[in-house]
Amino acid sequence: MPSSVIAAIVVVLILVLLAASSLRVVREYERVVAFRLGRLRGPLGPGIVVMLPFLDRMVRVDLRVVTLTIPPQEVITRDNVTARVNAVVMFKVADPVRSVMEVENHAVATSQFAQTTLRSVVGRADLDTLLAHRADLNEDLAQSIAAQTEPWGVEVSIVEIKDVEIPEIMQRAMAREAEAERERRAKVISARGELQASQELRDAALTLSEAPASLQLRYLQTLLELGADQNSTVVFPLPMDIIGPLLSAVERSTSGPSAPAENKPIEPTHKRGLAVVDDRGKVNPDE
């Protein structure tokens, strides 16, 4: 085979290899920031991109959302409580050119700034705000981090505080405080219930005093309820105007004929007492 033919074949093979090596496939979620002899060519892709060997250099940039976990940070809150706080940051590259030209490594820079911002924001809040109002702190963190990463072409979408660790002594103190607060609420509710019950009882007493017959019906209803139980002794209140004559007769019979009846005054009719009826039907007044 002539040497010229061999040389032609070698040249063709070299050209084919160079052409194959100059082709790059860029995925849909990626962009390529290309430099030709050090000069920016701009973002390329997606699809097939031609890169000249030894002349072009490319940097792939992922446009998907990146989840960045901030390691636990030792912070001191505004009320001088030491806590360990970690968070998660979700961001994505909005401008591939600026993410390469403005910062060396946008992911590392975002992580470092997020850590310092987390310590700063949490340090301005007290412990109660950190535990009960995380939404406000998350919004403040997102705004602070986004304001710094926007010139880098990085868009911060979500910043969430994941966990807050406080000393064990503080946990016990908070438990005692919560228990005391629950006891206070229980006492307040009980006092309010007694006040409402007393008001209702006062209204019921006023209503019954306007109709004496309703009081007698109430007595009969009480007797009916007590009779439903298998009790040998029943204690119930009776008005003195009902049992007054019976008591006077019993006292006259026990005191004898020589004792005048006038020496024993009869209780006023408006006074009320208690009577005990046992299983033999005997009435025992409660003095």
Image: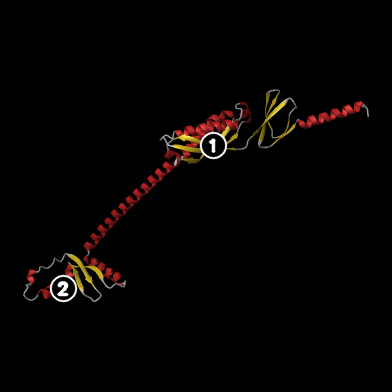
Q: Which quarter shows the C terminus?
A: bottom left
* Side of 49 where 241 appears, left or right: left
> Between residues 31 and 211, which one lies in front from this camera angle?
31
Q: Which quarter shows the N terminus?
A: top right
Q: Which amino acid type is marked by label 1? A: Pro
* Side of 160 where 241 appears, left or right: left
> Between residues 80 and 266, which one lies in front from this camera angle?
80
Residue 281 at what x, y percent from top left? 23, 76
Element at label 2: helix
Residue 230 at what x, y percent from top left? 31, 73
Residue matched to label 1? 71
Q: Which of marks 1 and 2 is in front?
A: 1
Q: Outermost residue, right direction?
A: 1
Residue drawn 62% across the image and 26% down it: 101
Residue matched to label 2? 246
Applied colour scheme: secondary structure
* Side of 238 where 191 appears, left or right: right
Res 81 quadrant in image: top left
Label 1: few (<14), some or many (≥20) within 10 Å? few
Q: Which amino acid type is marked by label 2? A: Leu
Above or below, comparing residue 253 to residue 93 in the picture? below
Is residue 159 in view? no
Res 273 quadrant in image: bottom left
Is residue 147 in view? yes
Residue drawn 35% across the image and 49% down it: 183
Residue 204 at what x, y percent from top left? 26, 60
Element at label 1: strand
Mark 1 or 2 closer to N-term? 1
Q: Residue 19 carries which label?
A: none
